[in-house]
Amino acid sequence: MRKSIHYVAGAAVAGLLISASLQADAKGTVKPAVTDVPATTYSLDKAHASLIFEVSHLGFSNWTGRFASWDAKLTLDPKNPANSSVEATIDPNSLTHDNPPAGFLDQLHGPQFLSALQFPNITFKSTKIVMTAPDKALVTGDFTLHGITKQVTLDTTFNGGWAKMPMDPGGARVGFSAHGSLNRSDFGIGMGVPPKGSKMGVGDLVNFQIEAEFSEHPAPEAKQ
């Protein structure tokens, strides 16, 4: 029985080593997922993109909001993702929420929180991409919020794509999911942060989730 256990354990270790060797080249770097999507600059398909975030509310729930207006540009090198880059711009005035009380969104847009009139853009510009698996990467960049710029890292997953599709007027298409976090007080937004050891307030930690499809050709503007 002991030999069988050792054999199974050894086989499992060997399997992990083989899997790792398939994902890494001779220098130990992760090989990107095999895909036929072309290296080019892609536009955000806003109809298939979302940016949501959550913060603790009194420790009772995670209050969830979203930004309804944002845009991004992706320059993709699928054979060497480290050479890729992404830039995004978010309109802080587009922050919205289901069933907001009267005046609540105005408060969030105002000087107590986002100061959207004074700082009309939230931006992200990547500075470094590190592959962690064939379809995963850590994307670090300069994030500017409330007039303050700090580095933020996105844990990103490549969901796939195609080079061209007869029924897709956007041409080549790729899709990604990403998530990350930040402390809003680091960006000068400290209103309502609970005292240390307490949950009586609105949490400092902000978790966010991004779903994004990018297409080779920008989608036509919606008719007014």
Image (cartoon, helix red, strand yellow):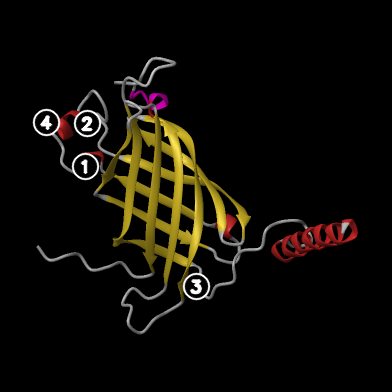
Q: Earlier in the sequence, mark 1 or mark 2?
A: 1
Q: Is the residue under label 2 in contact with that under label 3 (CB below 8 Å)?
A: no
Q: Earlier in the sequence, mark 3 or mark 2?
A: 3
Measure how far apart labels 3 and 1 are at the Cα level. Answer: 36 Å
Tell me the residue that label 1 is attached to.
97
Please report the bounds of the magenta region as a residue range. 185-189
Say if the magenta span includes residue 123. Answer: no
Question: Label 4: how many residues lie within 10 Å, few (<14), some (14-19) or many (20+)?
Answer: few
Measure how far apart labels 4 and 1 are at the Cα level. Answer: 12 Å
Numbered mark located on residue 37 in the image: 3
Decide if residue 150 is on the left or right side of residue 27: left
Tell me the residue that label 4 is attached to.
103
Measure how far apart labels 3 and 4 are at the Cα level. Answer: 46 Å
Q: Is the residue under label 4 in contact with that under label 3 (CB below 8 Å)?
A: no
Q: Earlier in the sequence, mark 3 or mark 1?
A: 3
Q: Amino acid at mark 4?
A: Gly
Q: Amino acid at mark 3?
A: Val
The label nearer to you, 3 versus 4, is: 4
Q: Is the residue under label 2 in contact with that under label 1 (CB below 8 Å)?
A: yes
The picture places residue 38, in percent across and down from the top left corner, at: 50, 72
Q: Amino acid at mark 1?
A: His
Tell me the residue that label 2 is attached to.
108
Question: Label 3: how many residues lie within 10 Å, few (<14), some (14-19) or many (20+)?
Answer: many
